[in-house]
Image (cartoon, rainbow, N blue to C red):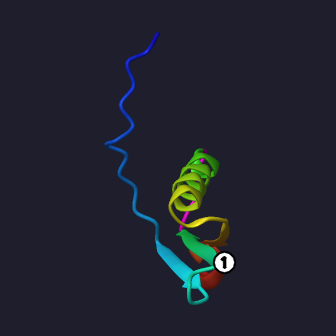
Amino acid sequence: MLNVDLSTVTMAADVVFGIGDPVAEILHLDAQAGPSATKHRDVLAYNVLLHRQYGVAQTLIFHLNFDLISS
């Protein structure tokens, strides 16, 4: 058995919009500047925490490839 305390979870999303009044949906925007082998885990954690607090959450990831811009 593990002694797990999740009360100290701290994460900061890039941008989160609440849509509607009262909030009916959540849109999480994430800008990714380079490759990340664990981005899917971050997105899952953001969505779980947002869903728990507000309800349904959707994520849109912007992959910023600066190599394409400079060439």
- Image quadrant assignment for residue 29: bottom right
**Amino acid type at mark 1:** Leu
Q: Which residues are magenta?
A: 33-37
Quadrant of res 19:
bottom right
What kind of element bears circle 1?
helix
Density class for disc 1 (Cα within 10 Å; few <14, some 14-19, many ≥20) is few
Pick the residue in front: 5 or 38: 5
* Residue positioned 55% across, 81% down in the render: 18
Q: Which residue is mark 1?
A: 68
- Inspect this view and state whether residue 35 appears: no
Which residue sits furthest left?
8
Q: Position of residue 33 (x, y in %)?
A: 53, 68
Mostly what secondary structure, the magenta segment?
A: loop
Q: Quadrant of residue 50?
A: bottom right
Q: Is residue 69 magenta?
A: no
Identity of the residue drawn at 62% across and 83% down = 69
Query: Residue at the bottom extreme?
Result: 21
Membership of 35 in magenta stretch: yes
